[in-house]
Amino acid sequence: MADATQAGTVVPSPRIPKVIGILNIVFASGLILGALCMAGYAAMLPMIGKAMEDVQKKADLEVEKRKQADLKAVEEEAKTATTDDEKQALEARRREIEARPRTQVAPGMDFNKMGMNDPKLKFYGWADALSAVVLNVAMLASGIGLVRRRRWGISLGIGTALAKIVRLVVLYSFFALAVVPTLAQNMGKFVGEMIVQQQLALGKPAPPGFDPQMMTRAYSIMYTIGAVAMIVFGSIYPAVSLWLLSRPGARAACDESKLPKGQELNETW
C-alpha cells in the first residue's frame, strides 16, 4: 500500500479507501446499534426503578404483617405470664420484634441520591448521544463512499475521523472536569449509606475503619481514569484512518483525474 510516484504522478492505492471504508461501515453499524440499545436501556431505567419500589413495598407490608402478628402473640402470652423471668423474656422478645429491620429486596435505585438528575450530567448525556449519532451516521456514509472510491468519501472520512477525535477530547474532558466531582460525591455517599444499612440489617456495625469519603475518592478516580481511557483508546482508529486517508495514494485512488489512462474507479483492488 506504499505510495509511489512515476514520472511525477502519484500512483493510486485503492486498498486504503476500500479497507478503511469496510471498517467504517462495520464500526459505524455496531456503534449505532449499541447506541440504540443504550437508549432503550436508559428509557427502561425509570420503569425498572418503579418496579423495584413496588416489590419493596410489598415486602415491607409482609414484614409488617408478621411483626404485628408476633407482637400480638407476645401480648397474649404476657397475659398468662406469672413469673418475673417469663415477663422479662417476653419483654425482651417484644423489643427484638419491634427492632426488626425492613427486608431489603434489592438495592434501591434512587436517581436523586445517585446524582443522575444533575444538569451537567444531563447535558453531557445528551451531547454524547446526539454527537455520537451524527458522527456515526457520517462514518457509515463515508464508508460507503470509500468502498465505492468516491472523492466525497475521502473528504467525509477525513472530516469524520477528525471530528471524532475532537469530540472525544472535548466531551470527556468536560465529563472529567465538570461532571465527575459531583457524580463521585453523590455516588460515594449513596453507596456508603447502602453499605452501612446492609450491615445494620444484619445486626452488625459499620466495617472497621470505613470512611464514606473513601467511596467518593474511589468513584472519582474510576470515572476520571475511564474518561482518559475513552480519549486515548477511542482516538486510535480515527487517528489511523485520518493518517491513511490523507496519503496521496488514497486520495488518488478516489480521483478519476489522477488515475492512469484507461483505469476506472470501479476496478478491483
Image (cartoon, helix red, strand yellow):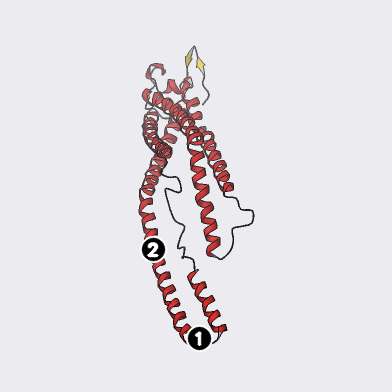
Quick one: 244 or 106, which is closer to the camera? 106
Question: Residue under circle 1?
Answer: 81
Question: Residue under circle 2?
Answer: 57
Q: Which mark is residue 105?
A: none
Q: Label 2 is placed on what type of residue?
A: Lys
Q: Is residue 47 left or right of residue 247?
A: left
Residue 146, percent from left and from top: 40, 29
Residue 154, percent from left and from top: 41, 25
Q: Is residue 262 left or right of residue 80?
A: left
- Label 2: few (<14), some (14–19) or many (≥20) C-alpha neighbours in 10 Å: some
Quick one: 114 or 10, which is closer to the camera? 114
**In the image, which is nearer the foreground, mark 1 or mark 2?**
1
Q: Is residue 264 visible?
A: no
Q: Label 1 is placed on what type of residue?
A: Ala
Q: In the picture, residue 30 is in which quadrant?
A: top left
Above or below — where is 78 with respect to 25?
A: below
Quick one: 207 or 135, which is closer to the camera? 207
- Label 1: few (<14), some (14–19) or many (≥20) C-alpha neighbours in 10 Å: some
Secondary element type, mark 2: helix
Q: Earlier in the sequence, mark 1 or mark 2?
A: 2
